[in-house]
Image (cartoon, rainbow, N blue to C red):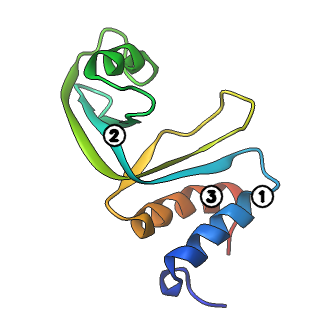
Amino acid sequence: MKAWEDRTTEEKEDIIHELCEDEFMQPDIYEDEEFWYVETAHSGCFIVPLFVCQDEKSVWDYCPEYCYPNEELGDIEKCTGCVGRFSAPGYMDCTDWMWAETLDKLLDTMIDWADSSYEYH
């Protein structure tokens, strides 16, 4: 079997979709997407695509899901790259958003989550 790192980006994306085909959580993958990169005082950082929060004010409203109570946001930067997460269609369950500069790197991050959950070998 071909090693993960030797596969093309298209092969990697197909594997992730096939791996999750009959699972509760499904991959959501977006290329060349604008997103907010948000730093917090204690929680580290999180990613919010612009199609979720169009402006900085809406990022502040979105923040309580990710931050400690009364935690202040640090720097908020608008970036462009590939974003993805796993979500359960029809439910509110989802992972945090992940990001990378390229689709190939994003898929590498996403397979780590999928592998620990769905045992890709």
Q: Residue furthest bottom?
A: 1
Query: Height in image: 11 above or below 88?
Result: below
Kind of residue at badge 3: Ala
Residue visible at 23% across and 16% down in the picture: 72
Q: Earlier in the sequence, mark 3 or mark 2?
A: 2
Q: Residue furthest right?
A: 22
Residue highlighted by disc 1: 21
Residue 43 percent location from the top left of the image:
33, 29
Q: Quadrant of residue 61?
A: top left
Residue highlighted by disc 3: 114
Residue visible at 29% across and 49% down in the picture: 80
Q: Residues within 10 Å of mark 3 (few under 14, many from 20)?
A: some
Query: Height in image: 69 above or below 86?
Result: above
Tell me how far mark 1 sits from mark 3, CA to CA.
12 Å
Mark carried by residue 112: none
Q: Earlier in the sequence, mark 1 or mark 3?
A: 1
Kind of residue at badge 2: Phe
Residue 86 percent location from the top left of the image:
60, 46
Residue 21 percent location from the top left of the image:
77, 58
Tell me how far mark 3 sits from mark 2, CA to CA.
23 Å
Query: Height in image: 3 above or below 82?
Result: below
Quadrant location of the C terminus?
bottom right
Residue visible at 67% across and 91% down in the picture: 1
Q: Secondary structure at mark 3?
A: helix
Circles 1 and 2: CB atoms closer than 8 Å: no
Residue highlighted by disc 2: 35
Q: Given this view, does label 3 or label 2 mark the residue nearer the observer?
A: 2
Query: Height in image: 69 above or below 66?
Result: above
